[in-house]
Amino acid sequence: MFEQHRDTLEKALSAIAERGYWSAYPESPSPRVHGEGAAERGKEAFESYLGKPFPLDQPGTGAWIGAERSPYGIDLGITYPEPVAEELVRAATTALPAWRDAGPDTRALTCVEIVDRIHRRSFELAGAVQHTTGQAFVMAFQAGGPHAQDRALEAIAYGYAAMTSSAATARWEKPAKGAPLVMDKRFTVVPRGVALVIGCNTFPTWNAYPGLFASLVTGNPVIVKPHPRAVLPLAITVLIAREVLAEAGFDPALVSLAVEEGRGLAKTLATHPDVRIVDFTGSTEFGEWLERNATQALVHTEKAGVNTIVVDSTASWRGMLGNLAFSLSLYSGQMCTAPQNILVPAHGIETDEGHKSFDEVAAGLAAAVGKLLGDDARAVELTGAIVNPGVLARVEAAPSLGDVVLESRAPKHPSFPDAVVRTPVIVRVDPSRTDVYGHEHFGPISFVIPTGSTEESLDVLRDTIKARGALTAAAYSTSEDVLGQAERAAVDAGVNLSCNLTGGVFVNQSAAFSDYHGSGANPAATASLTDPGYVAGRFHVVQSRRPA
Amino acid sequence: MFEQHRDTLEKALSAIAERGYWSAYPESPSPRVHGEGAAERGKEAFESYLGKPFPLDQPGTGAWIGAERSPYGIDLGITYPEPVAEELVRAATTALPAWRDAGPDTRALTCVEIVDRIHRRSFELAGAVQHTTGQAFVMAFQAGGPHAQDRALEAIAYGYAAMTSSAATARWEKPAKGAPLVMDKRFTVVPRGVALVIGCNTFPTWNAYPGLFASLVTGNPVIVKPHPRAVLPLAITVLIAREVLAEAGFDPALVSLAVEEGRGLAKTLATHPDVRIVDFTGSTEFGEWLERNATQALVHTEKAGVNTIVVDSTASWRGMLGNLAFSLSLYSGQMCTAPQNILVPAHGIETDEGHKSFDEVAAGLAAAVGKLLGDDARAVELTGAIVNPGVLARVEAAPSLGDVVLESRAPKHPSFPDAVVRTPVIVRVDPSRTDVYGHEHFGPISFVIPTGSTEESLDVLRDTIKARGALTAAAYSTSEDVLGQAERAAVDAGVNLSCNLTGGVFVNQSAAFSDYHGSGANPAATASLTDPGYVAGRFHVVQSRRPA
């Protein structure tokens, strides 16, 4: 069954070894790719969920809960079954043995089928992602759809590679006096136990899929606990996974949904003795709580970080400003990968358009953002809407943090009058103000910081990231020597670095199968999407041997 | 440098993929293998340490401590520098960047050179292992020498394979409107941080080498904290490692020794914020403490277990009894892999010598042990000596636990009059006495347990191992069906199973490169020696990308 996905799996296995460009799922929402009417059918499918109980066949408890409200200003009105933690875990545990016994190949191909069906519903999911995260439609389609699907496939490939890196059977023949000792051995992959995936508000699918599929392919049943504000994308995902699993003859309880309204379900599940894997994306506070308390589980967390840009010099003044402006503006900076601290020498920088003072760099950046987002109707297609009141409060508080270089605006959304939209605010702060820039201000808030030199900038990068973590860092320089120093600082700080981005590649974007997301080597994340370390702890090998 | 080990590394990489028979280091102590005089020179080298400060160049604090006493009844009189935890960690941290920057190939080949030099000092190490653990000489040579060296090489190979499974550089070329987007990417392996290896009393080298070399090859400096009663084998190991590292131009602080006299150094080091990996072998109590408290670190523990034998039927009555008797007697059952619970149907079993009642099975086993250990001079070469007073106390308490089937004897050691030697005690207990057999009685203590049926025996196996863990399990049956059920129970319990061992392979022995030791899938161990999960969490990958 699902043998038709063998080729995709093989290609993914090559891709994770080579790490060049590869994608299994086209990112374009064009009808040329998805067929005429696909977008419309997806929109209808999304809208069909609104104002109703979600059609999940999972045993509930009678109570149906849910209070999602689109950042574009509409209540979704969808309710979901509120589960009893103990029952979810028990059902998952019961489902485990048959899934384990199915073996790596069947699991991997079944997982690819799940992703494939998710892909075919990318438009429906785009609507769900847009109206839970506030992402603009095209981004919701791409990041919430094909890009997330590629990350899922990547996790499946890593899991499959790890499970099959050693032989499943072997004959052991040891020379000995008289006759050799000969044993036949069998090695069985066994899952760690029930897995829990705790989703986030901003990228419900992209951040949840790697953990979901890494655990599932290695044999672990998965309980998906979405963020209360971003349930629908994961509810649809769970629905599809259960449908495929049931068709393949497995217990659909292998994937279940755990919706909550802030009554501590995540803590209850994460510390349940039978829950042996936790994948979490969210706040540093709860991530650290999980690391300290869910000691019975393998815990992978992605938390807050302080993404840093070091500007030393550039061969493309306009390219650099345009690229940075886009990175600050995309989804109103509500990406865990969006730049926050922009470090520029106080004495200015050399560029292809001559020397630019610190103030010229700051003003140039402000102007580039202003120009990019000058037209409201076009601006909102880049910024989307503000995901939740916490972000809005931080935007409003930002001017008090230093000297405002660029004020945030509130464009009117042409289609959604109640959408909460904000453009980036840029604030100048002194390098001494680590109390301000030394932690994350999640949202469209960035700081330009005049340093004594690029050397000091790199020290700030190293120190803040070692202390508070980061998902991304970038450097701009025309000097090989400085780029080398930046790479050295990035390795010391354990952060992924982008150099001299002036075109169509942005610091806040990572490509599955080539770029790693997070490193695990600084406090922002304990693992990387996705690498061998992300999958290896999710299963064990149990052997049996007998004389041949 | 050390390029001569490339071939050994390549062979080890093939071996871990194929998992058939392979060994890099000959296990025979014969002069034909090691040359004339090697044994004598090794003995002299061992004896040269006695009664003196150990010649470790590591910066100490002035205090020299140590109170090792051989289980064969002699004080070793060796002292070691007592370290300040903070200074050890600082020195290790300072040594890290150059080792990291050396890259996977240099690290792997340097690690193989360390193991190679350890191998050439196997006789010296055999003396050290014998007189700290109480193992008989041949076992101390094999298990403490070549077998431990093979496990070290296995860990190096797994680490190298994991670090090199993806390309170190890649060109990413994404089709785009106009020109493709082209980026050059570099992926750098970065270590997790300082690693701590906490050694055990009984197998100081065998149990410590996998963690030591898995951490070192992946770039982590390693602090080795031996058991206070078994310092010398690891002190020699650290000495050799530091010598090789210094010759290769690295800071010898990459490997250091942390000797203590029970003042909590292990806890201080294990919870130090810069200590990011802990490998531990020892008691369940301290292992669980580490799992709960060293939350800043990746913690791999090997703890107590309840190893179980299910006897259903056999085609070789004498082979089975002889094999089991050997497993119970070897090193007086002081192996984490030695059988403890022997489950036999109360109605007896079928054998090639006819039906045997439960009492005949128990008596047959007692007689086989009695015969194997009948001659004191030969017995001690199998049992060795009792490692510490805790084991002795358990042997003495065992008769009170049920009906004694075989009494423990105290053979006289012909060469060491003060050696504490004990042969196995076998006690019959009812299946209801889970309070007795449901936890580990470490030492030469085993239980024969009359069950209602083999099915009940398998239930007991499953239940006790799920609850308390095990390193090994075995089943004897002439029925394919029963063996299948046993394999199923072993997979459910997450324990490695041996079937129908009647010859020269024993349940308490595992061969590097083919057998896994521990599974990580039950409470006795959180990891397996050695598999991808054992190495993958010890490093991360940091990437750098720039436009091509």
Image: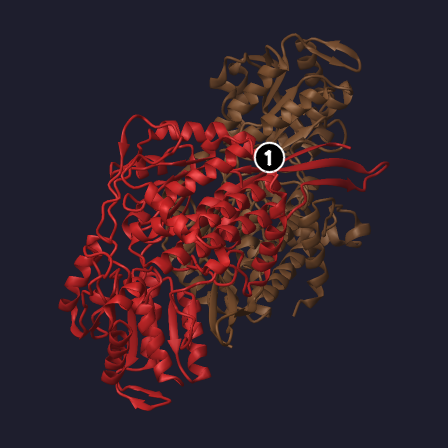
Chain colours: A brown, B red
Question: Residue sitting at 40 percent across and 72 percent down?
Answer: B489
Q: Can you see residue A226?
A: no
Q: Report x, y in % for residue A347.
A: 65, 7
Apparent side of residue A206 relative to residue A294 in the rendered image (left or right): right
**Mark 1 residue crowding within 10 angstroms, few (<14) / some (14–19) / many (20+):** few
Apparent side of residue A513 relative to residue A253 in the rendered image (left or right): right
Apparent side of residue B27 relative to residue B318 in the rendered image (left or right): right
Task: Give residue B543's quadrant in the image.
Answer: top right
Quadrant location, the C terminus of chain B: top right
Nearest the viewer among A446 and B284 is: B284
Task: Give residue B428's quadrant in the image.
Answer: bottom left
Label 1 sits on residue: B102
Q: Report x, y in % for residue A446.
A: 59, 22
Q: Can you see residue B380?
A: yes
Nearest the viewer among A383 and A316 is: A316
- In this rendering, the count of numbered labels is 1
Spot the residue most to the right: B178
Question: Residue sitting at 43 percent across and 66 percent down?
Answer: B496
Chain letter of the residue beneath label 1 in the structure image:
B
- Residue A266, relative to residue A111: is it above or below? above
Question: Residue sitting at 55 percent across and 19 percent down?
Answer: A460
Label 1, secondary structure: give it: helix
- Residue A241, relative to residue A457: is it above or below? below
Spot the residue most to the front: B36
Quadrant location, the N terminus of chain B: top right
Q: Report x, y in % for residue B225.
A: 35, 40
Q: Report x, y in % for residue A252.
A: 52, 65
- Residue B531, relative to residue A75: is it above or below? below
The amino acid type, in three-letter code, at marker 1 is Ala
